[in-house]
Image (cartoon, rainbow, N blue to C red):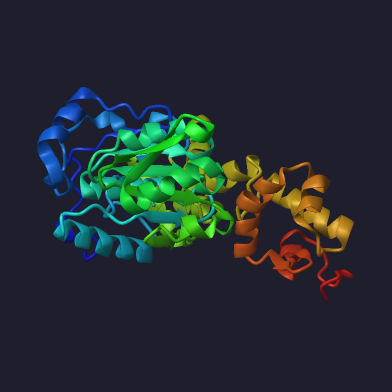
Amino acid sequence: MAIISSQSGKTPDRSRPQRRTDDANSSADSSDASARRSSSGNNRLLRPQANSNEDLAVEDTGSPSDASLRPQSLSDYIGQRELKEVLGIAISAAQARSEPLDHLMFYGPPGLGKTTVCAALAYEMGVKMHMTSAPALEGAKDIAGYLVNLKLGDILFIDEIHRLPKVTEEMLYPAMEDYRLDITVGKGRSARVTSLKLPRFTLVGATTKVGALTAPLRDRFGLVQRLRFYETEELVDIVLRTGRLLETPVDRQGAIEIARRSRGTPRIANRLFKRVRDYAQVKSNGAIDANIAATALELFNVDPLGLDWTDRKLLKMMIENFDGGPVGLDTMAAATGEDSQTIEEVYEPYLLQIGFLQRTARGRVVTAAALQHLGYEVNLPLNLW
Ligand code: ADE
């Protein structure tokens, strides 16, 4: 395959060593990693490093079973074809020049694999990934702690990068552009700025709200890439792969039933898979088919399009209290008791994607498709029509 230049046509090699990945609380280097670095220099970017298996990237939970479901390399990664192609080119070019990757930004709704893609990038480049999240970078010291621990080519992954405090963001500008850390020593008139040279590194930012980034920060990323919702067929492949990894028999129809209800999102597909697996184990012989999957997911209140109780509450509130809209985000939040940021970043993107909501200048409106799905008559006196 063209996407992974240095390993074109390779079959996924499960014995390939994994790179270390730091979590948000620890950027401290292990002594073996430091020793490796001091002798490896630039070539480290081209060479996988021997390492233990327990350091797989973890996106959202500390659960080892979740981590084990994540694809390690880009060739194991299902879906996001265009993104993989773009990344494959960037990796080939950087490796051919023995240079680190340019700074990258991934954006898109939660659960689509921003962290997983970044971990796969680190794997392909043979470098270490340091993970943190913008809200954890409150003061200058926090980001400085990460930056001074970076080695040549390392990836610094900052989740929710749209939430960076201003002071941190401003420290990142020279770090990204000139690989320089400016530290202010002292206060007031006696304050002095001291600069520290940093190794060339790659900053990978992830966000659900690319529009909330400041232009100076956004413009410092060489590649800005969107992760899109997954097609049902891609999710079917992910569910079948999860079944193999968790040693749970699942037939294609069963996988389709789970995939259809997963809101285009692998994280949800894997979560639903585990609930269906429990149900199959307790109520049947442990194997998952279409009937078991559908019955289990109905029991868990996930409808055939993947809408849950909160989606339905949002849509019903708009239909019954506001004639279908337009309704402003804050009103939606107040009327449902949900947080407006959660509505905007978690619920709304999928409802927009399946055409159940539309955004207008005056607010959100419910569509005829949503009315039909929820069993309302479509000729209601909705404001839209
Ligand atoms: N598990 C979660 N996301 C995945 C993906 N995109 N490909 C393969 N396995 C996955």
The residue at the point 42 percent across, 61 percent down is 224
Give the quarter of the image for residue 90. bottom left
Residue 253 at x, y percent in the picture: 46, 55
Of 57 and 229, nearer the camera is 57
* Image: 209 above or below 352: above
Residue with the most extreme top position? 31
The residue at the point 65 percent across, 59 percent down is 351
Residue with the most extreme front position? 189
Name the quadrant of the C terminus: bottom right
Left or right, residue 74 beside residue 188: left
Left or right, residue 245 beside residue 192: left
* Image: 254 above or below 1: above
The residue at the point 29 percent across, 45 percent down is 72
Residue 258 at x, y percent in the picture: 51, 50
Give the quarter of the image for residue 356. bottom right
Q: Is residue 101 visible?
A: yes
Of 45 and 353, nearer the camera is 45
Residue 307 at x, y percent in the picture: 65, 52
Left or right, residue 166 beside residue 15: right
- State the count of labels: 0
Give the quarter of the image for residue 328. bottom right
Residue with the most extreme left position? 39
Residue 112 at x, y percent in the picture: 47, 52
Q: Is residue 61 visible?
A: no
Name the quadrant of the N terminus: bottom left
Of 64 and 121, nearer the camera is 121
